[in-house]
Amino acid sequence: QALQKSLMSSFDFVIIGGGVGAGYLARDIAPTLAAEQKTLLIISSAPNSLTPMERPAVSKGSLIPAMTFLRNPMEDDGKKFPYVCKGADGPTMPPSWYEETEGVTFMGSTTCQSVDFDSKTLTLSSGEPVTFGKLVIATGSRARALDGCGAEGSTWDELHSEDIDEQFQLKDKNKWGFGSCHTIRDVGDSAKLVAAMERVEDDDQETCYWPIVVVGGGFIAMEVAASIASKAEDLHVTVVLSNEHFLGGGRGGKPGVFNKEMSEFYERQMCQRFGVRFARGYSVTGLWPTEEAGRYCSLDGPAMDLKKTRERQFDACPKQFTDCRGVILKNVNDETDNDIRLPARFVIFGVGEKPNSEFLGDSLAKVEGGYLKVNENCQTSVPDVYAIGDVAAMVGEDGEVVKTGHVDAARKMAAHVAGELTSEGGGSGYAETPYFYSSVMGLDLGWKFYGKCGEGCTIVTIGLTGWEAAEKASDVAWAAFYVNSDNVIVGVLLNNGTDEMKAKLPAVVEAKAVVISTKKLKKCTLDEVLDNPHLLTPSELGLGEFHAETDEDEVKEAFSKYEREPGCGFVEIRHVPDLMTSLGANFDDVETKDALAALDDRKVGLVTFEAFLAWWCA
């Protein structure tokens, strides 16, 4: 059977890529292959012993030095290695699964050099042609880093063949110690990073007290920083953020996935429990060469917000350092402040990704960034060609681009495409609510997010105030609701929480509930909103009606903004129309004139808060 598979050059289905999406798609389509005598080829640049694995382990458990079995598929015959479906909803799929499953061929250490879509022919790195009936592109993405930082490329051979042998052992661990540069995307990266964590000085070498520098503000950077700081007590971690906070909490209050309040919840615990320090508002412009010594400004001061120091002397770099002795920073808010040196034991970049789509050229439609444009059925611009996972971006009929670079999206897109490949299509389309999650090792914290977030959304947190008083932060359940400009709840994030709470999250987003006021939403309990998303949906209005804010505290807050002097207790009558509008009024000119006459019947030109409140709420 293995010989027959190796001699085949034509397949009903071909998957380019050996990641999570490929593994789940193979699992879901396998019954059809056996029943209908069809064939599937998976082309992967990784070795044959590294069939698709669950990627979340790479930035979590794989970074625990003792857990070598999470980094090496050869250890104990891979029995504990996180192959696809390990811990998910199905059996683990080691290399033997692909060898033994009827109709499935896994071709490792192979890349696709080109695709002729007219003849449906692939040219492989071996030079051999392979024809296909339907093609799925699942090549994923690679980590971004500075030019010249680490190996360049998108395949296993380009990234790791010089450093990792066939037994998945590092050829030279010293290369990945002091002064090394890292990204984190696969088990090869994990192995190099753990080697750097374990590297200690030789007897004749100067002790290094410099921190590990993590560059980036996304959830991968947060997970890696927390994992290292919590598991390696002798190592110190400094995080460099170009924004003000983790996960998109930018300067000027611009929200991302987190707002400032949410980011600080995690940052303060990382700082207080593990000594993690933060440099905010700095970008990395280059690596600090090992041969450069002299007087430079650096960063020091409060752990939560490092500040620029005066120039200090940096002597010759210790001889055990390889690629760099740190990073060169610039202040993103001051272009003249661009030569700050931050020494580093080693450097980790977690600054985003690039889709592995260059080999396709312009033959398929792409969106900004190089992601393959797909429709609601994950179909590309060429018939019988699909794309799933990190390489794909779904574009709706309204032109909205949905890009969810998360393992859950890869799994669900794979399941949908499995149905497309084995049917005539024309189904309801991939309509999963965008979802991703993260767990932060060492803090016993994790969050789940459903829906949309970002530009134009107001983030309303419930349950987050006063978490410092809790005995353990991991006991605190709080949520964030993302309300768009039409006052519709379009996203929800739950930190910790019970399984019952988590199960309610999709329904909150799918309800598309309108809230009459984000301030009123803030005053609700978490259970109230999760149980009834429409709790604050306003009633339908009749002719001439409007929804008015009548809560006394809210009215008082609005009134205070128009007071002649702060705290004086009265407003000039000329400002009352604006005050009423801020509270929801929609009066015409005649109604406004009648309102002012009623409020200022003595014609003194002033109205007190008590008088306004009584009239407004009557």
Image (tube, rainbow, N blue to C red):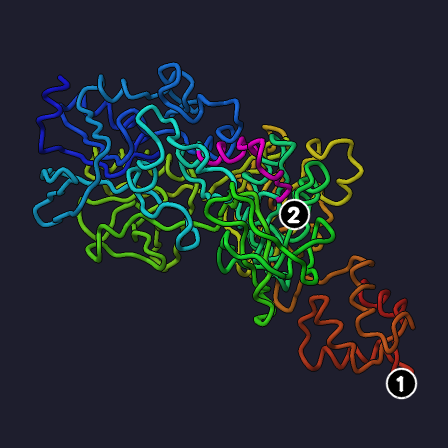
Q: Which residue is mark 2?
A: 262
Return the residue found at the far front. 204
Instruction: Single out the mark in the foreground, 2 or 1.
Output: 2
Q: Is residue 256 left or right of residue 476?
A: left
| Magenta region includes residue 194 | yes
Looking at the rendering, the stretch of residues picked out in magenta corresponds to 192-210
For the N terminus, the image quarter is top left
Q: Residue at x 65, y 46 (%)?
A: 535
Question: What kind of element bears circle 1?
Answer: loop
Q: Is residue 43 left or right of residue 434?
A: left
At label 2, the amino acid type is Met
User: Where is residue 385 shown, x and y percent of the image?
Assistant: 20, 45
Q: Is residue 538 visible?
A: no
User: Where is residue 35 shown, x and y percent of the image?
Assistant: 17, 21
Question: What kind of element bears circle 2?
Answer: helix
For the C terminus, the image quarter is bottom right
